[in-house]
């Protein structure tokens, strides 16, 4: 391995210069890392094989380092658990489970966990993973607010390939969020890696349970209703809901459900419906086809029995809404710039349809039977009252941005952008009103327990 003498980053043998600062690279053995009073681990070797080179990020669960596995001469990420976390039996068991589950999963689009053990000298527990170059989706959204359609389609295709493999093994991720989707840059576009399987729900028979009945695990902005209630019936469709919420945020720059605290967010998920994505994305720099409204409405259905059945189906439906043919398994390998050309050509074919999609409450144009036809400039609208939304107006609810680790942190705390949630008239199942009453009672009584997973 080679290393940069300035920043201590490590690189393969064929690399010549550090892309971060342009310094010429030399063999890592010739550039020893030196510890500091703030972190004496830097420069040491853990478990007799993992050489710690530099600090990558800090999180609530541990500190992440870049290092070299001296046994394999490869670059690794080393997460050393905080002492208080290591003393907690449940937290320790979750890291152990993440390591064990990782060995069962395909790793093309899931971060590979290589080792989990205690260093005999420092008595510190460490989780060793493959090192990833890139950044979390959370940081991309903070910087760019919205994601280009071709980037979104490719990302969803990769996530679907990874999650469908996990779901086939009866493993539900249960904490999908932008912080846990890592985008590795390549010449063909992003290659996505799913992070943090420490909150996995094992649906296999006789699986060991770590969660107390009635406890909710996950990030509230992306929780499915059944997950928010802590129901044991939770299955892979909860991950579909979470991925749909992430998709909504990528398109609009806003989460579909918001609130001032955890319980209020969960209550919104259980009782409210977000604006159609084409309405919420008004003014976006990217096209938002009207077909996406139905796609995300189905994927965000509160009843899992009518929700999109798999993440693969969701990824395919989103791509087809943008005019692509085929399915997500094919788009996963198409270079991003080629997807961009195809989507742009398809979107250019229906500008009128997309313009009308931005205002679903507008009256239909005169002398036409098609509600999707564009009204000519200056043409009067049809007489009669306009349909009104079920809510008297938009309810602003801002989710303050929270600090998170820098790119390369392998999972960070949620930092939501400003969001607005407004209800729209939707059909309600028979059980919906009793559910609202029950949930409201739980929230007011403090009965909903939330554990926001923050493996950073």
Image (spheres, grey):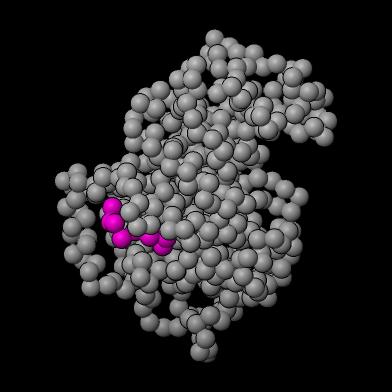
- x 59%, y 22%: residue: 48
Magenta residues: mostly which secondary structure?
A: loop
Apparent side of residue 436 relative to residue 206 in the rendered image (left or right): left
User: Can I make out residue 38 in this image?
Assistant: yes
Apparent side of residue 352 relative to residue 28 in the rendered image (left or right): left
Residue 311, placed above or below residue 97: below
User: 89 or 254, which lies in front?
Assistant: 89
- x 40%, y 39%: residue: 94
Apparent side of residue 234 relative to residue 340 in the rendered image (left or right): left
> Is residue 232 magenta-colored?
yes
- The image shows residue 95 at horizontal and vertical percentages of 44, 37
Residue 184, placed above or below residue 150: above
The picture quadrant where one finds residue 21 is top right
> Is residue 140 magenta-colored?
no
Apparent side of residue 7 relative to residue 52 in the rendered image (left or right): right
User: Can I make out residue 148 in this image?
Assistant: no
- The image shows residue 113 at horizontal and vertical percentages of 55, 40
Residue 152, placed above or below residue 40: below
Query: How many numbered dots are placed on residues in this image?
Result: 0
- x 52%, y 50%: residue: 104
- The image shows residue 24 at horizontal and vertical percentages of 82, 24
- The image shows residue 340 at horizontal and vertical percentages of 70, 62
Residue 146, placed above or below residue 364: above
The picture quadrant where one finds residue 401 is top left
Magenta stretch bounds: 230-239
The picture quadrant where one finds residue 391 is bottom left
């Amino acid at each position: 391995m080679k290393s940069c003498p300035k920043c201590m980053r490590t690189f393969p043998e064929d690399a010549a210069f550090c892309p971060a600062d342009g310094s010429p690279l030399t063999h890592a053995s010739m550039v020893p890392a030196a510890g500091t009073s703030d972190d004496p681990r830097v420069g040491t070797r853990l478990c007799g094989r993992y050489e710690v080179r530099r600090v990558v990020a800090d999180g609530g669960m541990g500190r992440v380092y870049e290092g070299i596995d001296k046994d394999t001469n490869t670059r690794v990420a080393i997460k050393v658990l905080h002492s208080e976390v290591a003393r907690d039996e449940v937290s320790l068991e979750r890291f152990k489970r993440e390591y064990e589950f990782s060995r069962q999963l395909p790793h093309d689009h899931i971060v590979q966990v290589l080792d989990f053990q205690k260093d005999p000298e420092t008595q510190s527990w460490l989780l060793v993973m493959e090192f990833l170059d890139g950044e979390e989706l959370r940081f991309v959204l903070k910087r760019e607010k919205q994601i280009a359609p071709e980037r979104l389609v490719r990302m969803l295709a990769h996530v679907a390939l990874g999650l469908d493999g996990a779901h086939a093994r009866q493993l539900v991720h249960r904490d999908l969020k932008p912080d846990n989707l890592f985008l590795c840059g390549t010449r063909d576009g992003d290659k996505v890696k799913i992070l943090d399987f420490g909150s996995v729900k094992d649906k296999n028979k006789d699986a060991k349970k770590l969660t107390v009945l009635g406890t909710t695990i996950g990030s509230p902005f992306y929780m499915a209703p059944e997950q928010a209630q802590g129901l044991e019936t939770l299955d892979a469709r909860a991950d579909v809901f979470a991925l749909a919420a992430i998709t909504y945020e990528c398109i609009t720059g806003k989460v579909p459900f918001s609130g001032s605290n955890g319980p209020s967010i969960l209550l919104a998920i259980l009782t409210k419906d977000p604006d159609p994505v084409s309405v919420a994305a008004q003014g976006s720099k990217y096209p938002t086809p009207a077909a996406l409204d139905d796609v995300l409405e189905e994927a965000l259905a509160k009843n899992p029995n009518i929700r999109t059945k798999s993440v693969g189906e969701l990824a395919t439906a989103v791509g087809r809404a943008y005019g692509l043919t085929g399915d997500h398994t094919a788009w996963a390998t198409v270079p991003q710039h080629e997807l961009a050309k195809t989507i742009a050509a398809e979107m250019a074919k229906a500008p009128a349809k997309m313009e009308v999609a931005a205002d679903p409450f507008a009256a239909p144009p005169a002398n036409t039977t098609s509600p999707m036809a564009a009204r000519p400039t200056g043409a009067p609208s049809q007489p009669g009252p306009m349909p009104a939304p079920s809510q008297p107006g938009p309810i602003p609810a801002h989710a303050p941005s929270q600090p998170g680790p820098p790119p390369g942190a392998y999972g960070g705390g949620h930092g939501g952008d400003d969001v607005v949630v407004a209800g729209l008239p939707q059909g309600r199942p028979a059980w919906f009103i009793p559910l609202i009453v029950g949930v409201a009672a739980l929230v007011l009584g403090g009965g909903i327990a939330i554990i926001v997973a923050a493996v950073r």
